[in-house]
Image (cartoon, helix red, strand yellow):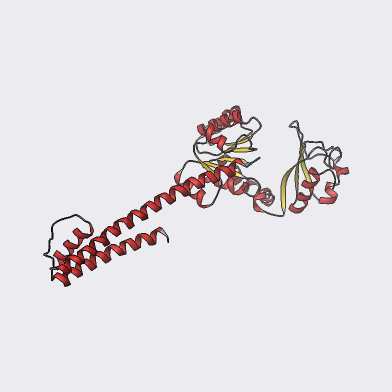
Amino acid sequence: MEPKKLILLGIFWLFLLIFGGTLGYVLIEKAHPFDALFMTIITITTIGYEEYIPLSTKGRIFTIFLALGGIGLFFYILAIFSEIIVKNTVESLWGIKKMEKKIQKLKNHCILCGFGRIGKYIYDFLKHDLSVVVIERNPKILKELKEKNILHLEGDATSEEVLLKAGIEKAQYLVAALGEDAENVYIVLTARNLNPNLYILARADNPKVEKKLYQAGANKVLSPYVIGARKMALSLLKPNVMDFMDLASPELQAELQIEEIYVEDGSFLVNKNLIESGIREKTNAIILAIRRKEGDMLFNPNPYDVILPGDILIVLGERKKLDLLSKWAKKSEH
């Protein structure tokens, strides 16, 4: 039975004892209603006053059962609260242990520090493609994370211990999305020391903090306010460009998308130029750019540019065709 129903049952029991006891003394001992009520209260609470109403044999027998009912009610209430406390404690500890075990098994996941307004949107965009572990310390947000069954840890994201629990040594990405720039700087610095190969994306509300975040070890620093303002301005100045960008945004789940595809060594595409690869003919995808392993970016590559191992292809095309191209980039044959 649910705790609320058990508590309501206890309240009903209490009122039943008070009403039944008062009525019993009125009928058995012909007592005044207020005297009967007083006698009932001191009996069920086992206060131990002397008989306020002169009792007959029947009255004393009635008082015995009334006192036993009061004692039973006391133990019933004690049992309810004990069960609620123990149940919540066990469920909480069991839930934390279960969550930590799931997190320990993760690899190449993303650690999201902060689940505020920005963090929630980031999680919604990432959850379909990546395993995400959220680090949060706000009790209200933690309750929401628990209700939504989202992998999370309670604690300070700037703490090495918490980051290690989140599996930072095996993680691929970390997003520092807290509302305080100073905390994001400290998170980036701590995370970079724990995992030199981690890709770190950091939020910066103050443009002056960007340099510090890069110095601390961030791979990319973004300001939500600057991005939002730029997009709003472009919507006024270049609405058609913005319509195209929205159409190609992955979060819209549209057919036309811009994706980045990593070319593995031994792939069918390796050491072929764009014409020989057959990408355009077989997938109708457009190669917007090629990012070399060394970091150089080739914008609008010509048909004779060769695809090399470790290249990242920035491609515009239909979702299904891009999935096919992604398979070509991983397999040694197509």
Foreground pick, 76 / 200: 76
Residue 72, position as x, y percentages in the image: 30, 59
Tag count in the figure?
Answer: 0
Foreground pick, 154 / 190: 154
Question: What residue appears at the point 29 percent right and 56 percent down from the top-left corner?
Answer: 74
Of all residues shown, which one is farthest toward the bottom? Answer: 27
Looking at the picture, does residue 254 appear above or below residue 224?
Answer: below
Residue 40, position as x, y percentages in the image: 19, 62
Foreground pick, 128 / 121: 128
- Image quadrant holding the N terminus, namely bottom left
Q: Can residue 142 be seen from the camera position used here? A: yes
Residue 28, position as x, y percentages in the image: 16, 71
Q: Left or right of 286: which side holds 60? A: left
Q: Left or right of 29: which side holds 126? A: right
Q: Left or right of 110: which side holds 144? A: left
Q: Can residue 116 be seen from the camera position used here? A: no
Looking at the picture, does residue 293 appear above or below residue 255?
Answer: above
Looking at the picture, does residue 261 appear above or below residue 46?
Answer: above
